[in-house]
Image: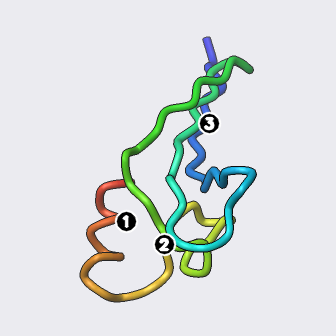
């Protein structure tokens, strides 16, 4: 039996967002059923690669964030 599985990391901005860090959420989809989980991490939207689902940069903090998401 084949199972359809998808994992997505994304930034979830509040409606009243002005600037600053935004929480990172993880969405898991299995056979069309979704579940969202907060990762308890934050990232600046300017440093986020939406297509890749990771932070952009080579600083230690960015590397640790990407390692945590992996």
- Would residue 4 be found to the left or right of residue 7 on screen? right
Where's residue 31, x and y in %? 69, 18
| One can see residue 70 in this view | no
Q: Are marks 1 and 2 in contact (CB under 8 Å)?
A: yes
Name the residue furthest bottom: 58
**How far apart are labels 2 and 3 at the CA level?**
19 Å
Tell us which disc is closer to us: 2 or 3.
2
* SS label for mark 3: strand
Q: Which residue is mark 1?
A: 66
Q: Nearer the viewer, mark 1 or mark 3?
A: 1
Name the mark on residue 6: 3
Determine the image quadrant of residue 49.
Answer: bottom right
**Which of the marked residues, 1 or 2, is nearer the chain's N terminus?**
2
| Quarter of the figure with the C terminus | bottom left
The residue pinned by badge 2 equals 55
Residue 53 is situated, as x and y percent measured from the top left of the image, at 57, 60
Earlier along the polypeptide chain: callout 1 or callout 3? Answer: 3
> Is any atom of residue 60 visible in this view?
yes
Instruction: Tell me the SS state at disc 1.
Output: helix
Task: Quote the CA–CA distance across marks 1 and 2.
Answer: 6 Å
Q: Check disc 1: other Cα within 10 Å, few if <14, some if 14-19, many if 20+.
A: some
Cβ–Cβ under 8 Å for marks 1 and 3: no
For the point 61% across and 11% down, the residue is 1
Q: Residue 43, which numbered label?
A: none
Residue 35, given in percent of the width and then of the height, sits at 59, 24
Residue 32 horizontal/vertical position (percent): 74, 20
């Amino acid at each position: 039996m084949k199972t359809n599985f998808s994992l997505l990391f994304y930034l979830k901005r509040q409606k009243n967002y002005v600037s600053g860090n935004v929480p990172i959420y993880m969405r898991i989809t299995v056979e069309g059923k979704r579940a969202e989980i907060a990762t308890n991490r934050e990232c600046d939207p300017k440093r986020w690669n939406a297509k890749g689902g990771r932070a952009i940069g080579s600083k230690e903090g960015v590397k640790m964030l990407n390692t945590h998401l992996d």
